[in-house]
Image: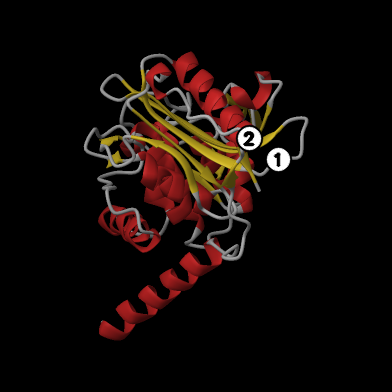
């Protein structure tokens, strides 16, 4: 048992190193014309901006303030599921046990789908029943799956995050903007997670009973913003949490370094988008690399 634990720890540590290869990345510096971001204009409970390559934090507001993760939880669900190495072309059925309320893929229990379609429905469409199905179909017990979610958080240095289940419906799932930025930086390096997080419409065929389905990404910045080129993202909402958002973004028209922006606890969905964009544009204007 000790040997097995040691192997798991070493592999996790190697994953941690692989997630952050840019140890010699250019560290951003304040421009001569630097001006402080008007934090008094923020309505969100907490926010952070991180330079993706170096991991340098360029701005933070209530950086270690604990907040309900809501569907941001699904990023870690996706990480743990992908790390099990399953064949995404394999087929599986949704089950009534996957239903936990909230947003869901509208199919009946017993619907036959590929694991890829279940994964994209969970990450792209934020379907809670599909997130629960990922845990059930992972080959792990529910307890072990959640244990690995928390273990991965520990390995990554997410010291203020705690998970109790994979959908985000449990208000005990808590995180901070610091920890969410760390998770985003790791998760979006995976090509499957990144693809799911940047797909605006995902269309697929349920195999049985046969039907065409599509899920829409809840991150409107993917399609409607002229300034941001989103390379990763996830939204989250519960009545108790307000609107949460994480984005990884480039500038749409100019060659600027990639940023990770996290917003926790906005009063409206649009406010989370507006403040994330405002923070990104301000960082590009006030830092040089």
Q: Residues within 10 Å of mark 1 (few under 14, many from 20)?
A: some
- The quarter of the rendered structure image containing the N terminus is bottom left
Quarter residue 190 falls in: bottom right
> Please, which residue is most extreme toward the front here?
32
Give how far apart the Cα atoms at labels 2 and 1 are: 7 Å
- For the residue pair 89 and 196, the one nearer the viewer reads as 196
From the viewer's perspective, is residue 201 above or below residue 174? above
Residue 50 is situated, as x and y percent measured from the top left of the image, at 51, 44
Position of residue 29 measured from the top left corner of the image (x, y, whole percent): 58, 47
To which residue does mark 2 refer? 284
| Badge 1 element | loop
Question: Cβ–Cβ below 8 Å for labels 2 and 1?
Answer: yes
- Find numbered disc 2 in the image and state the secondary structure of the residue it sits on: helix
Residue at x-position 27% and y-position 37%: 65
100 versus 274 height, above or below: below
- Residue 288 shows up from this direction: yes
Precedes in sequence: disc 2 or disc 1:
1
Residue ID for mark 1: 256
Give the colour scheme shown. secondary structure
Q: Using the rendered view, name the quadrant where residue 169 is placed.
A: top left
The residue positioned 29% from the left and 19% from the top of the image is: 239
Task: Please say whether residue 132 is visible from this viewpoint.
Answer: no
Return the x and y of residue 283 as percentages of the image width and height: 57, 34
Say few, some or many: other residues with alpha carbon within 10 Å of mark 2 (under 14 / 14 to 19 / 20 or more).
Answer: some
Image position of 42 (left or right of 187): left
């Amino acid at each position: 048992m000790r040997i097995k634990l040691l192997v798991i720890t070493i592999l996790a540590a190697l994953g941690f190193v692989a997630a952050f290869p840019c140890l010699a990345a250019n560290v951003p510096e304040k421009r001569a014309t630097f001006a402080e971001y008007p934090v008094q204009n923020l309505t969100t409970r907490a926010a952070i901006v991180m330079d993706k390559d170096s991991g340098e934090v360029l701005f933070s507001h209530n950086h270690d303030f604990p907040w309900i993760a809501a569907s941001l939880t699904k990023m870690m669900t996706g990480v743990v599921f992908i790390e099990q190495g399953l064949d995404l072309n394999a087929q599986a059925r949704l089950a009534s046990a996957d239903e936990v309320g909230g947003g869901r893929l509208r199919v009946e229990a017993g619907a036959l789908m590929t694991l890829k379609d279940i994964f994209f429905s969970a990450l792209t469409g934020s379907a809670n029943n599909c997130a629960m199905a990922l845990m059930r179909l992972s080959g792990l017990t529910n307890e072990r799956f959640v244990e690995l979610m928390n273990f991965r958080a520990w390995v990554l240095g997410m010291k203020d995050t705690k998970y109790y289940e994979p959908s985000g419906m449990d208000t005990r799932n808590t995180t901070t903007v610091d920890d969410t930025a760390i998770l985003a930086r790791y998760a979006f390096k995976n090509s499957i997670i990144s693809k799911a997080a940047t797909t605006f419409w995902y269309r697929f065929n349920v195999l049985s009973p046969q039907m065409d389905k599509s899920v829409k990404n809840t991150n409107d910045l993917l399609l409607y913003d002229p300034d941001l080129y989103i390379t990763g993202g996830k939204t989250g909402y519960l009545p108790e949490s307000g609107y949460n958002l994480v984005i990884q973004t480039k500038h749409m028209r100019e060659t600027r370094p990639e940023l990770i922006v996290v917003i926790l606890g906005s009063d409206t969905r649009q406010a989370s988008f507006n403040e994330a964009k405002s923070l990104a544009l301000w960082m590009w204007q006030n830092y040089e690399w």
